[in-house]
Image (cartoon, grey):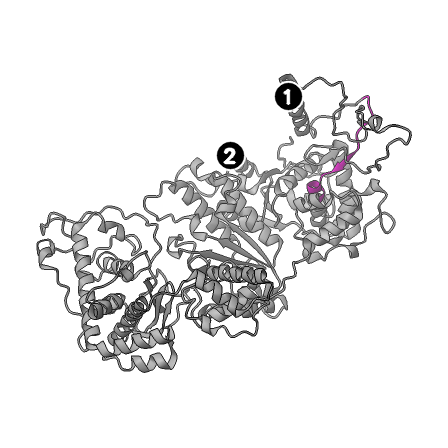
Amino acid sequence: MTQPTTSTPTFTTTSGTGTPADRRDFASAIRESLIAAHPGWATISGVITTCPPYAAPATAPVSAAASPRPANPTSNPARAEETANDAPRTDLDDILDFVEAEAAEAAALFSDALPPVPDAKDAPLYTLRPAAALAMVRLAATFPSPAALYEALSAPGSLTVLALNSPGLDETLLKLIEHLCARVPFWPDNAPLPHVVRAEEAVLSKDSRKRDTGLVGQLVPTVRTALETRRPVVAVAVAAGTLPQALRALNPQVITVAPLDRSMLADILTDAYLDTGDDREGGTVGPDLLPEDALCKGISAEALVLALRSPTLVGAIAALVASTTPATTEGPGLADFPLPREVREPVEQLVADLLAWQAGEIPWRDVTRGLLLAGPPGCGKTEVPRLIAQTAGITVVSGSIAEWSAEGGRGSEVVKAMRECFAKAAANAPAILFVDELDAVGDRDRVGDNNRTWTEYVVTALLAAMDGYDGHEGVVLMGATNHPERIDKAVRRPGRFDKVLRLGYPTHDLIPAAIKWQSWPDLADADLTGLGSRTAGMSGADIAAWVRSARALARREKRPLSVGHLETTLNDLRPPVSSELQWQIAVHEAGHAVVGAATGIACPQSLAIHDGGGMTRQSLLRHSQRRDEVRDALAIDFGGRAAEMILFGEPSGGAGGDSTSDLARATQTAAAMELSWGLGDDLLWLGDPETVLTRLRIEPVLRARVEARLREAQARAARIIEANHAVLEEMAAALVQTSLLTGPALEALVAKVVPELAGPGPVTLDPSDQDSAVSPSAGQDGRRDATLLTLAPEQPNAPSAPDLRTIQDRADNSNRAPDPDIIQPFAA
């Protein structure tokens, strides 16, 4: 290998621009060089071009025609000669096959360095592999002559990045550049050879670095040595946005490799079908037969392999056209999808910005991007990106940790797949890059993470990729999660995700639209408002399953889908409850509404009874996050339980149950007051609101404090219910009659609620707990000078409670409306 030298190369450099003819001439020269050297990574022999039709001899009997005979090795060079008298295969045969395969692979590796060995037999015919052909035409379009290639990559001390913006081609392009630099026709023999490396392999892994190393110290030794000796370095990157941070900080010259267009694709097809006799326009393929340039740039090497399987040129063109033609979708669109106002507005703004950018009306920097969709399973998070792309006429590229880990769970394998996903989005730009289940990436601040090293590596790589695509022309980043609080704060901060859109299950006013969405094209003009109350609390996925059951019933009856089919199947999914249970549920939900109105912190929006229980939706009126407000919210949580105690003499289990129940939410709120929000007797912060619940299991003192707050909230709710006994019964009776109470009817009943004159009183403990009534900073032995256990809080698996008080680490990227909903479900 020639060492760096200060002598002037004899090769004369010229401008890097050229005509299509120059590009074709350069590509043709590269092809001839590859065919002559026939390295295994670039060429292959034995491509079948014809297949004669089967014809048995007319005079031969069937038995003779079917008898085995020696195979013709020239008809299929890849097939070994076999005869009917071959002996059974043994282990030795397998060993010999393995040795031959290893030898062939070794010969391919050294094909550039060793001269070809003459063979007594006829030399095989070689053709380019699809990946090599794709890399060749794109490189020739970027540097249309050897002079242009040399001028761009040969400057002493230069660091050049070749960004492909397409996955799966970086290794082939690297080998192609090494091949060209090793040959005099393309690279002067007295010029220093550049050091060519894949971008992700130019930087040491985190485990291999020494601490406190600078930018140069993060490079692998070969790259560092090249820079120290002023040897040109060429880094091949899947995409510019996936460059490692250390490499990006060195300010390299980034050259984007020309994307595939129709003329390049025509050259590849012409070369692939030279020997088939299937040509057009005098031996060339007409570009007008191929997909548009905007579609061609998304064709990968894998897509080429699948298309070139066709034995005819016409078949290959048809396969390419089919693979690049956007799928036509019929049915309802984004305007018909049931979305709450606070979600629909930013989503429609994104669509408007994308359309305006494509029309050239606004620059890319003004396009809305960085949307994180948060909500429970089945609320439509994965459907929204598809609808945005469909409306804006762009592509969706999706990925997740599960997909990126499919080929291997090691950090390097996951990061490699992640970068390829980002590169695929860049290749298909304009596109939406949608990362599903974003919380699975992990949180570097999570306590007790046994895979901390893996989490830090993957999260850091994701941050680097997201920053690399900041402002990337045509790529919009979107994410989805069931648990936004489990996402690393650096990932979900503004600038990476500008807005957090919170999706819930359809409300009563959106349920008819949700049913029509799932039942399209049927029931387009049907009145479905009567089903709203009975389906309250259903997710979009639940509604989809319900409609499928109704369709199955309609098919059995051989009739079109009707509202009657929906009602029949709904009775099976949610059997009607007894009148006694309906009254109990109505009292419980009315209790929440009465307490919310009496405290003045909330305004009831709707009450519903469905066959699986009940639901109350209220909007928060005050957001100062003061102690009295939090106590008001606790009283609302106990409104349903207190109403049952007043009217029935005892509560039911409707306030408890899973992690979203009234008691669960109230317990988490009370614990957060003591340990997270600084609203207890002490100022200690001992964990996030989602993590402090684990301390209750091991600290009796803290349990006593939380229990005292819960009992005080229940007593306060009971006092409010006593003062509004008549209104409570009237509201519950109206709810039983209609199953859904909202609008003017609910407003008239709420106006009758007597406001609470006095606020919450001091927290008092049960007399039996007086001995342990010490502050959370006291120890479990009850001594005032003892200290509370400070065990590190663990991350729970339970989802966080609905956001009554909206505790967030930031407030400028949430779509929270001025009156966020407070939802109290009743577990029937």
User: Could you say where residue 327 lies in the image, as x and y percent from the top left?
Assistant: 65, 58
* Residue 21 relative to residue 252: left or right: right
Of residues 87 and 680, the one nearer the viewer is 87
* Residue 273 relative to residue 764: left or right: right
Mark 1 neighbour density, 10 Å: few (under 14) some (14–19) many (20 or more): few
User: Could you say where residue 318 lies in the image, as x and y percent from the top left?
Assistant: 75, 51
- Residue at mark 1: 94
**Residue drawn at the location 41% of the way across and 44% of the way down:** 455
Q: Quadrant of residue 614?
A: bottom left
Instruction: Give the mark toward the camera: 1 or 2.
Output: 1
Q: Is residue 346 visible?
A: no
- Residue at mark 2: 221
The quadrant of the picture occupied by the C terminus is bottom left
Is residue 126 a member of the stretch shown in magenta? yes
Image height of 685 relative to 206, above or below: below
Secondary structure of the residue carrying tag 1 is: helix
Of residues 811 and 37, the one nearer the viewer is 811
* Residue 219 relative to residue 76: left or right: left
State how far apart marks 1 and 2 are (Cα): 41 Å
**Residue drawn at the location 25% of the way across and 58% of the way down:** 667
User: Could you say where residue 339 lies in the image, as x and y percent from the top left?
Assistant: 48, 68
User: Could you say where residue 595 lies in the image, as x and y percent from the top left?
Assistant: 25, 72
Secondary structure of the residue carrying tag 2 is: helix
In contact (CB < 8 Å): disc 1 and disc 2: no
Which region is colored magenta? Answer: 120-134
- Of callouts 1 and 2, the N-terminal one: 1
The quadrant of the picture occupied by the N terminus is top right
Image height of 657 relative to 420, above or below: below
